[in-house]
Image (cartoon, rainbow, N blue to C red):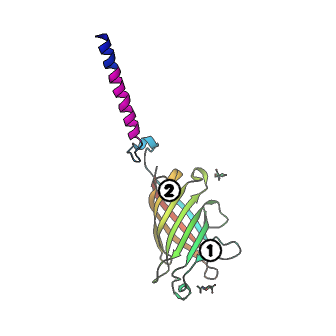
Amino acid sequence: MAVCIAKLVVAVFSLLFLSTLLVSANSHTFARSLRPLELGLRKEKLSHLHFYFHDIVSGRNPTAVRVAEAQMTNSSATGFGAVVMIDDPLTEGPEMSSKEVGRAQGIYALASQEESSLLMVQNYVFTEGKYNGSTLSVLGRNSVFSGVRELPIVGGSGLFRFARGYAKAKTLTFDRKTGDTVVEYNVYVFHY
Ligand SMILES: *[C@@H]1O[C@H](CO)[C@@H](O)[C@H](O)[C@H]1NC(C)=O
Ligand SMILES: *[C@@H]1O[C@H](CO)[C@@H](O)[C@H](O)[C@H]1NC(C)=O
């Protein structure tokens, strides 16, 4: 009798062990659901960022350079087809000499045959204080001669993980001679 019970116990434990193996094999699935707290996500916050964007196309150290264009770009009234790579400073105040809080890195391209409208594909790379190293990703349409343009913020990294929101862009100065532009940005984002 005692032997029988012992055998039964061994059998039950073997089954349990086997099922653990099966479960752990299953945990290699590529997707699972988890609770936000497991990623340390507590409460969603809303932040407002305010900075000035300096698009410098002239001089010896431009921060915006044309990298591509179509054959017909020169004959297009709206510059359709031009692609510009930027690493534009973002500053706290409107003057170039004020404190740099980050850079806008990416591309804008002239994407309209009807007006001066840009496709904006950029990351704001912040360098200031606790935001140092965090980024926001922008993907939107920028009709540059409109008063205030709205661009979607489609994501972010670091402090801005799970970010979503929008940026309001307003041209502060546009130098017709050089093409240099300063744009005021107000960015509103939800993030954790
Ligand atoms: C367009 O014009 C610029 C400046 O005049 C010139 O450098 C460039 O080669 C032209 N591009 C084409 C595709 O004709
Ligand atoms: C931002 O982080 C980089 C890399 O960790 C560091 O070298 C730099 O000094 C930091 N800048 C500021 C303003 O804290």
The residue at which mark 2 appears reads as 156
Image coordinates of residue 189 in percent, x first then y, are 46, 57
Instruction: Tell which residue pokes out farthest to the left in this image.
Output: 1
Q: Quadrant of residue 64?
A: bottom right
Return the residue at label 1: 65
Crowding at dot 1, Cα within 10 Å, few <14 / some 14-19 / many 20+, comes out as some
User: What element does badge 2 sit on?
Assistant: strand
Q: Quick one: which residue is furthest to the bottom in this view? A: 75
In the image, residue 174 sits, relative to residue 1, either above or below, namely below
Q: Secondary structure at mark 1?
A: strand
- Tell which residue pokes out farthest to the top in this image: 1
Which region of the structure is painted magenta?
Answer: 10-27
Q: Residue at x 61, y 67 (%)?
A: 88
Q: Main secondary structure of the magenta part?
A: helix
Q: Which amino acid does the dot numbered 2 rest on?
A: Gly
Rendered position, 60 above or below 9 = below
Neighbour class for label 2 at 10 Å: few (<14), some, many (≥20)? Answer: many
> Earlier along the polypeptide chain: callout 1 or callout 2?
1
The reply, left or right, for residue 122 in relation to residue 61 is left
Residue at 43% over, 49% down: 44
Occupied quadrant, residue 90:
bottom right
**Does residue 3 appear left or right of residue 67 in this picture?**
left
